[in-house]
Image (tube, grey):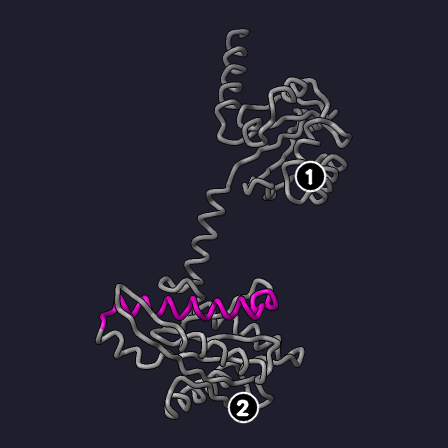
Amino acid sequence: MIEFEEFQNSLIRTIHEASPEGILVVDNYNIIVSHNHKFVEIWRIPDNLLQGSTPGTAIGLDDTPILTLALSRVKHKEAFLARVKELYENPELIDHCEIEFLDGRTIERHSTVLHGNDGKLLERVWFFRDITRQKDTEAQLTALSQQDPLTGIANRRFFFYRAELEFARSKRYSQPLSIALLDIDYFKQINDRYGHAIGDEVLKTVCSLCQMILREVDFLARMGDMEIFARLGGEEFVLLLPSTDVRQALVLAERLRKKVADHEFILEEIKLKCTISIGIAMLNSKDINFQDCLIRADKAMYKAKQDGRNRVEINA
């Protein structure tokens, strides 16, 4: 019987230490019962602090070394401390959340409780798992679903998703909303003469030039994290301008047009000039949906093409 108990204890210790998750066990008196190496690794606990955190050490809401260390590691200290406090005050609560660390890691935390045969609370067990790589992969997949693979700007799908949201917001709060459609002039001739590889470089360069202007006019700062400059397809691009009237849109469009027209494209020892035609429309009371405004911008761009290209036209 004693040998079997020793075997069980040895097995539990082995599983405990071999776990890919960091584990911390605390009893109902806030005394550390055990922790494994992965817990130390995830929280990067120095040896001198670990010596004071062996089984039998108290870990509570006071200024304990472990809690102080934890707060120094996480981004959102107040929220972290508030949740820990809530768990201490409500011992039966189960916790599952993600913690952002200052060093860029994301740690998934799960906390549950253990009861004795009589139903009384014995211990709280904390599990910590590093999910940074998983979160990075998710972010990359999200970016791929929203970005045009050639130019790196927003793709058609993401643009229309954001455009519908901005259309609704503009209508609700009576805020101006403008659209600028951009098309590279004679792009088919560039492809036919120099090949698609050069054509792709022209597309990427035009995007870079436009983004330079957008940054110069503090466009991105004004819109927060919403950069809505997208490639609709081929050589056609679109710029969604929330809180921007047609006059402001015209000033910006002229800067974009001039930036591209003044640039000398040097691609694989080939020198060429390139221009863009731009059509602008602003949301009005007659627009039933976002497409109505987009159609007017398209008509304005077509007029710019008809009237000689390398110009900006407005369809109010």
Q: Kindly identify which residue carries mark 1.
A: 93
Of the image marks 1 and 2, the number of the one nearer the N terminus? 1
Q: Find numbered disc 2 in the image and state the secondary structure of the residue it sits on.
A: loop
State which quarter of the image contains the C terminus. bottom right
Distance (Cα) linking label 1 and label 2: 59 Å
Residue, x 48% and y 73% (percent of image)? 160
Residue 138 percent coordinates (x, y): 46, 51
Residue 185 percent coordinates (x, y): 34, 81
Residue, x 63% and y 21% (percent of image)? 50
Q: Find numbered disc 1 in the image and state the secondary structure of the residue it sits on.
A: loop
Query: Mark 1 Cα within 10 Å, few/some/many (few <14, many 20+)?
Result: few
Residue 68 percent coordinates (x, y): 70, 31
Q: Amino acid at mark 1?
A: Leu
Residues at discs 1 and 2 in contact (Cβ within 8 Å): no
Q: Quadrant of residue 84?
A: top right
Q: Kindly identify which residue carries mark 2.
A: 316
Residue 61 covered by magenta stretch: no
- Residue 216 is left or right of residue 88, and the answer is left
Query: Mark 2 Cα within 10 Å, few/some/many (few <14, many 20+)?
Result: some
Q: Is residue 219 above or below residue 251?
A: above
Q: Residue 54, which numbered label?
A: none
Q: Amino acid at mark 2?
A: Ala
- In magenta, the rendered stretch is 194-223
45 vs 94, nearest the viewer: 45
Q: Quadrant of residue 108?
A: top right
